[in-house]
Image (cartoon, grey):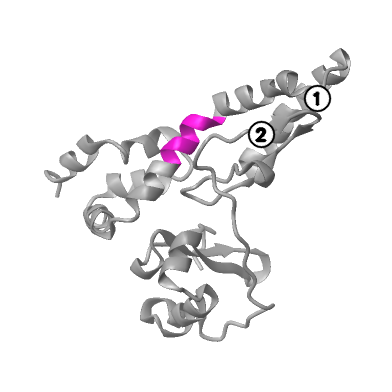
Amino acid sequence: MNKEGYIELILKKNYQPGYFWIFPLPDGKANVGAGMLTKEISKRRVDLKKMLMDTIENEPEISRRFEGAILQDKIQGWGLPLGSKKRKLSGDNFILCGDAASLIDPFTGEGIAPAMLSGKIAANIVKKAIEKNDFSATFLNQYDNELYKKTWGETRLSYMLQKLTQWPWLFNFVVGKASRNKELQKTITSMFADVDIRKQFTNPMFYLRLLFKG
């Protein structure tokens, strides 16, 4: 694994829209897995666990890295409720947070940060509800409004990027340019954490400028 402890997201055609990942853990261990959209798994009748092991055992550039590796537990999977549209997140006497509210980033699959944010906002709204003794859907709807105000722009952007991964030729074009351009390499690696950088990838002018770069 990389000595700096970087996470690795490996974009392979047979996983798109999705990716194969290697996340470093302490003591020389790693979280290794793969994800795809559920509808693609159903449409293509993919056995994701089998595809994962085939990648580890037979992909030349990947399998050599797993020589001597020991599987620590059985392979487990779970469906992730990705954010893709605005849903009703509260009602009479209830508020939904985290995965229950489908807040997982649809591009990166990251859900811890939005879960923590939703919990914080929910706590503030519940505090107000207790003070007012009002747990109606109308009062608790403040939660929906505040949460979407803070998260919807990023969620919508990530959903658009997820759609872009359905065109492998476009990603191959960008990665090909990045292999020869240090600045573009930095842009791509920063996009997963920086929303403003991520916005560039939904702008047609970004790809037009790439045509004239070496």
The reply, left or right, for residue 190 in relation to residue 149 is left
Give the residue type at disc 2.
Answer: Leu
Question: Which label was assigned to residue 194?
Answer: none
| Residue at 53% from the left image edge and 52% from the top image edge | 109
Q: In terms of secondary structure, where does tag 2 sit? A: loop
The reply, left or right, for residue 77 in relation to residue 10 is right
| Residue at 87% from the left image edge and 20% from the top image edge | 130
Provide the major secondary structure of the magenta segment: helix
Q: In terms of secondary structure, where does tag 1 sit? A: helix
Q: Which residues are magenta?
A: 151-158
Give whichever of 130, 60 is nearer the camera. Answer: 130
The reply, left or right, for residue 152 in relation to residue 124 is left
The reply, left or right, for residue 93 in relation to residue 198 is right
Q: Which residue is mark 2?
A: 89
User: Which label lies toward us, 2 or 1?
Assistant: 2
Residue 133's place in the image compared with 50, above or below, is: above
| Residue at 78% from the left image edge and 33% from the top image edge | 94
Give the residue type at disc 1.
Answer: Val
Q: Is residue 35 magenta?
A: no
Circle count:
2
Residue 27's place in the image compared with 96, above or below, is: below
Name the residue at the left extreme. Answer: 212
Question: Which label was assigned to residue 126?
Answer: 1
Residue 115's place in the image compared with 51, above or below, is: above
Q: Is residue 153 magenta?
A: yes
- Percent x, y of residue 152: 51, 31
Give whichever of 184, 132 is nearer the camera. Answer: 132
User: Mark 2 or mark 1, which has the lower sequence index?
Assistant: 2
- Percent x, y of residue 61: 38, 77
- Percent x, y of residue 93: 81, 30
